[in-house]
Amino acid sequence: MRQDGSSENDIENVIKKLKDGKTLDSQKPENENKAFISNEQIEEQMKEFNATEEGIQDQIIRYDDGSYSKVELEVLDIEKDEIVTQDANGQFMTIRAKGDDILTQAEYTARLYIDTHTGGSNYIDSVSNYSIRVNIGNYEDPNLLISRKTEHRSEGISAKSYLTFKRVAPASAVTYYLRVHTGESIGDQYGIWVDFNGKGGSYE
């Protein structure tokens, strides 16, 4: 928590709440967090990519009880010399998606094709290298998959992948999702977004 900027008071509040068996605000069903990188940002990085902190988009939401939710979208590689058979208006790139709500951390990598011009489609080529860590309890039933390989841009439907697993603690069992979407519009911008939550329920 300290490395993410939490104060000593925040840390004490979280510890007390956990000892009392209460749910942290960061894990309540109504709270969700996401990070976004637009096609325009990606196109700029394609011109002269290097793996620096400029390739990382993150978002931390802090709650009144001292807890927080953090998501991170890190660009690991842009394959500038890759021969693209679909069209010449984009590029393959590899990202790492991460989620953290203090009690649970998860990440995986995804290789994407990003079409930076209108008329084409983004798609998810592959997902791999997942990692899960829980600080209380353990996890079960991990599953990493691509649920929709190619976006349907004319219909506003994104390509999607997700890592799902269940965190099991003495008094609770929560299903987590770490999702990557590409091709879906955020406002008037297309791009990639990552979200992480422990709401449970179904994923469509």
Image (cartoon, rainbow, N blue to C red):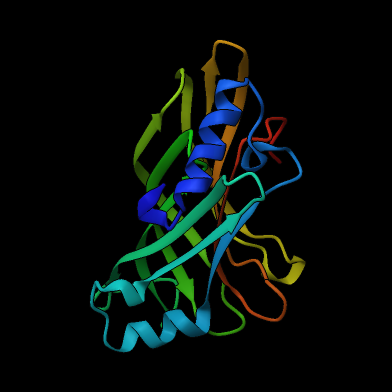
Left or right: residue 146 versus residue 105 is right
Relative to 160, residue 42 above or below: below
Relative to 8, residue 54 above or below: below
Quadrant in the picture for residue 155 = bottom right
Across and down, in percent, residue 23 comes to 66, 29
Quadrant in the picture for residue 125 = bottom left
* Nearest to the observer: residue 23 or residue 189: 23
Left or right: residue 60 versus residue 20 is left
Q: Name the residue at 55% across, 21% down.
A: 19
Q: Name the residue at 70% across, 47% down.
A: 31
* Nearest to the observer: residue 180 or residue 17: 17
Q: Name the residue at 46% across, 26% down.
A: 142
Across and down, in percent, residue 55 comes to 35, 73
Across and down, in percent, residue 113 comes to 43, 66
Q: Is residue 110 visible?
A: no
Q: Is residue 125 visible?
A: yes
Q: Name the residue at 36% across, 68% down.
A: 92
- Of all residues, the one furthest to the top in this rendering is 170
